[in-house]
Amino acid sequence: MNDTSAPPPGRPGAGAKIRVRRANADTGARPGQPPAVARSAQTAEGGERVSKLMAARGLCSRREADAYIEQGLVFVNGERVTQLGTRAAPDAAITMAGEARARQENQATILLHKPVGYVSGQAEDGYKPAVTLISARSQWAEDRGRRFQPACLKGLAPAGRLDIDSTGLLVLTQDGRVARQLIGEDSSVEKEYLVRVSGTLDERGLKLLNHGLSLDDRQLRPARVERLNEDQLRFVLREGRKRQIRRMCELVGLKVTGLKRVRIGRVCLGDLPPGQWRFLKKGERF
């Protein structure tokens, strides 16, 4: 009498199915698919580094990607990646484990109204960096959601610069995605400034401010510059060269006497008082 409990030739038994399901659970593959290792695109010659692909897709920064890879939290076509420098096809499916996504949700992005006298980054010439203003005491009273914790300061860095003698909106973040969006090479996020000037501006000078000037032998991207009144201009830029607005104004015979950044992308300074800060809200996007 035949043993009907034995699997037919060429078909796995129940134990094999369980092992396949477990393998797929470990690698992130969908049920019913073969173990992901057989589908790996990682070793394809001419591929890109997985960390570079992740950064290009806005999943995280390259530094964060390397950390997630080392911790086994990244999957390429369903296969767990743990080796730094691993390459993948440009169209490979790349996902992150839930633990990595949860960490990203907890990363802080802070909006500070920087006053005059603070530098954006590292301390220089005796001036304090803007990050020293971030504390429980200086959190805006109207920021009623998340509260300050010391962990918010770990790895917190400015996503862009604001001159020591300028004031207004400065973004500091722990999130590489935000930093890349605001200061990456391909960033096109608008920054809006209110600029007080002295001197005479004619129509030719105004036209040059909008397009036609160069700094450091490189032509500037087109800007939107309009006259608000006798001594105030409104600038909207999509780049951030060092002291760009001040140098632009000098080229057309103007001197900047006051500069305030009031908007970055869709996020406005609003009523945030000088020297105080708030968290970027959930759902708030640049």
Image (tube, helix red, strand yellow):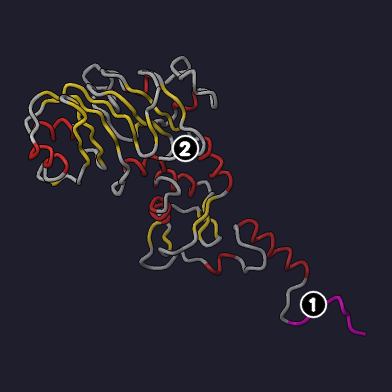
In this view, the mark in front (2 or 1): 2
Magenta part of the chain: 1-9
Q: Which residue is mark 2?
A: 284
Number of on-image labels: 2
Question: Is 6 contained in the magenta span?
Answer: yes
- Residue at (25%, 41%) from the top-left corner? 239
Location of residue 262 with respect to 43 vertically, above or below: above
Residue 134 rendering spot, x and y as whole percentages: 41, 21
Labels 2 and 1: the sequence-earlier one: 1
| Residue that lies at the very extreme toward the front in this rendered image | 229
| Residue that lies at the very extreme toward the top in this rendered image | 137
Kindly report the secondary structure that dominates the magenta region of the rendered protein: loop
Q: Which kind of residue does numbered mark 2 sit on?
A: Glu
Quadrant in which the C terminus appears: top left
Location of residue 12 with respect to 56 vertically, above or below: below
Residue 282 rendering spot, x and y as whole percentages: 52, 36
For the question of whether residue 149 can be seen, the reply is: no
Q: Is residue 89 left or right of residue 235?
A: right
Q: Is residue 164 left or right of residue 285?
A: left
Residue 170 rendering spot, x and y as whole percentages: 34, 29
- Viewer-side residue, 120 vs 85: 120
Residue 115 rendering spot, x and y as whole percentages: 30, 19
Name which quarter of the figure residue 45 lies in. bottom left
Quadrant in which the N terminus appears: bottom right
Q: For mark 2, does the 10 Å Cα neighbourhood hold few (<14), some (14 to 19), or many (20 or more) residues?
A: few
